[in-house]
Image (cartoon, rainbow, N blue to C red):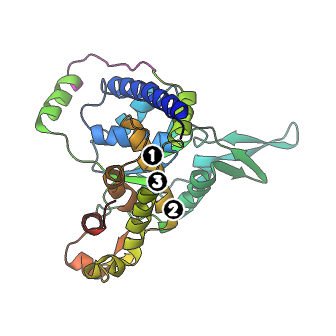
């Protein structure tokens, strides 16, 4: 990379980071705390990847998604995934017009920039299958016609913990389409006090749009130019391979604990997410720490544990932590 190109890239990154800081500040008018969740939502939007948010009700998941939508001047749709939801309720349908003898298309809520799939793990499999094409191909097929979805298009799905009544695991093919899986926790004591004050003050908090979809797409193009050293690329591949063949990386103890390792999609997403994390950090290059920071969010829903691991009360997060602590860092 020449000095002129590097300087130009640095200037672009500086511009984007200033805008993103303004966006997070604006969203902070409505959402108290939850910095980890908000940063990851923004990261996924820039990286063109979907997010699965897992957490108990009342943790501001829906509020955060709506707030970011308002701050970016994007279209927003919310669909509550219930057991009686039909694919047509999500995608739309063809309607017959007797006066013309032709069919017209009524587009569903999926035709938007940000789609909030609320409690996605409560809907039947046929609805999940209908969403799969939209998530992967950014298009929807109705009848014999295919319709492109707007850009950017992002699915932000919330999920109650699997052990709660009335929920069931999502199909693995669909889970793999989510770039990140975030575990949303409770606010701190001070944050909860601030939430209580705001929500009982009677004063509404409005968000002023500070970004446009075009600026998000421009940031995405900038992120693709961020430098990744070949050693960092090797590190990413080694991390992913360690989930499949842990014995090759001095992790023999994990061989009986991992049922299925991460797919090649995880490799792609890990690189893309690390680049955007570098962008958000104001850097024109990716560090191994970027990979370690975003890695658990990329891998926790892709590394499936065995019954033996469950019997030992080990989660995929525990196994991923072992992998990152053992695989050599460049």
From the image, state whether disc 2 or disc 3 is nearer to you: 3
Badge 2: residue crowd in 10 Å (few <14, some 14–19, many ≥20)? some
- Whether pointer 1 and pointer 3 mark residues with C-beta atoms closer than 8 Å, the reply is yes
Mark 3 lies on a secondary structure that is helix
Q: Residue at x 44, y 49 (%)?
A: 273
The magenta span reads: 199-209
Task: Please indicate whether residue 297 sits to the left or right of residue 125 in the image.
Answer: left
Badge 3: residue crowd in 10 Å (few <14, some 14–19, many ≥20)? many
* Residue bearing the label numbered 3: 271
**Looking at the rendering, which quadrant does residue 256 occupy?**
bottom left
Task: Please indicate whether residue 14 sits to the left or right of residue 250 in the image.
Answer: right
Q: Residue at x 35, y 37 (%)?
A: 281
Query: Residue 90: where, in percent of width, then height?
Result: 58, 47
Q: Is residue 112 magenta?
A: no
Circle count: 3
**Looking at the rendering, which quadrant does residue 234 occupy?**
bottom left
Q: Residue at x 31, y 18 (%)?
A: 204
Label of residue 263 in the image: none
Q: Main secondary structure of the magenta part?
A: loop
Quadrant where the C terminus sits is: bottom left
Could you tell me how far apart the alpha carbons at marks 2 and 3 are, in whole angstroms? 10 Å
Q: Residue at x 29, y 46 (%)?
A: 57
Label of residue 265 in the image: 2
Mark 2 lies on a secondary structure that is helix
Instruction: Note whether residue 75 is visible.
Output: no
Query: Residue 258: where, in percent of width, then height?
Result: 34, 77
Q: State the residue lying farthest toward the top.
A: 203
Give the mark nearer the N terminus: 1 vs 2: 2
Could you tell me how far apart the alpha carbons at marks 1 and 3 are, in whole angstroms? 6 Å
* Residue bearing the label numbered 1: 275
């Amino acid at each position: 990379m020449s000095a002129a190109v590097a300087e130009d890239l640095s200037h672009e990154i500086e511009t984007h980071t200033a805008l993103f800081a303004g966006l997070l500040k604006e969203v902070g008018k409505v959402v108290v705390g939850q910095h980890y969740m908000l940063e990851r939502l923004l990261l996924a939007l820039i990286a063109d990847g979907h997010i699965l948010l897992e957490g108990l009700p009342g943790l501001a998941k829906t509020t955060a998604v709506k707030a970011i939508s308002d701050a970016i001047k994007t279209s927003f749709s919310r669909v509550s995934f219930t057991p009686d939801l039909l694919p047509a309720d999500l995608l739309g349908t063809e309607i017959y017009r007797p006066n013309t003898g032709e069919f017209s298309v009524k587009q569903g809520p999926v035709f938007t920039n940000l789609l909030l799939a609320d409690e996605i793990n409560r809907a039947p499999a046929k609805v999940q299958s209908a969403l799969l094409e939209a998530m992967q191909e950014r298009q929807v097929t109705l009848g014999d016609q295919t319709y492109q979805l707007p850009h950017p298009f992002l699915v932000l799905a919330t999920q109650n913990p699997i052990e709660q009544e009335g929920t069931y695991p999502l199909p693995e093919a669909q889970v793999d389409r989510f770039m990140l899986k975030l575990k949303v926790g409770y606010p701190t004591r001070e944050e909860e006090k601030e939430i209580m004050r705001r929500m009982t003050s009677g004063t509404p908090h409005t968000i002023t749009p500070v970004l446009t979809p075009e600026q998000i797409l421009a940031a995405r193009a900038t992120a693709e130019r961020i430098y990744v050293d070949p050693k960092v690329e090797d590190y990413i591949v080694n991390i992913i391979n360690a989930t499949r063949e842990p014995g090759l990386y001095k992790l023999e103890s994990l061989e009986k604990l991992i049922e299925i390792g991460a797919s090649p999609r995880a490799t792609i997403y890990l690189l893309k997410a690390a680049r955007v994390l570098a962008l958000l950090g104001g850097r024109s290059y990716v560090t191994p720490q970027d990979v370690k920071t975003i890695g658990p969010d990329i891998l926790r829903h892709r590394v499936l544990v065995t019954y033996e691991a469950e019997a030992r009360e080990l989660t995929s997060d525990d196994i991923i932590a072992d992998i990152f602590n053992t695989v050599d860092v460049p």
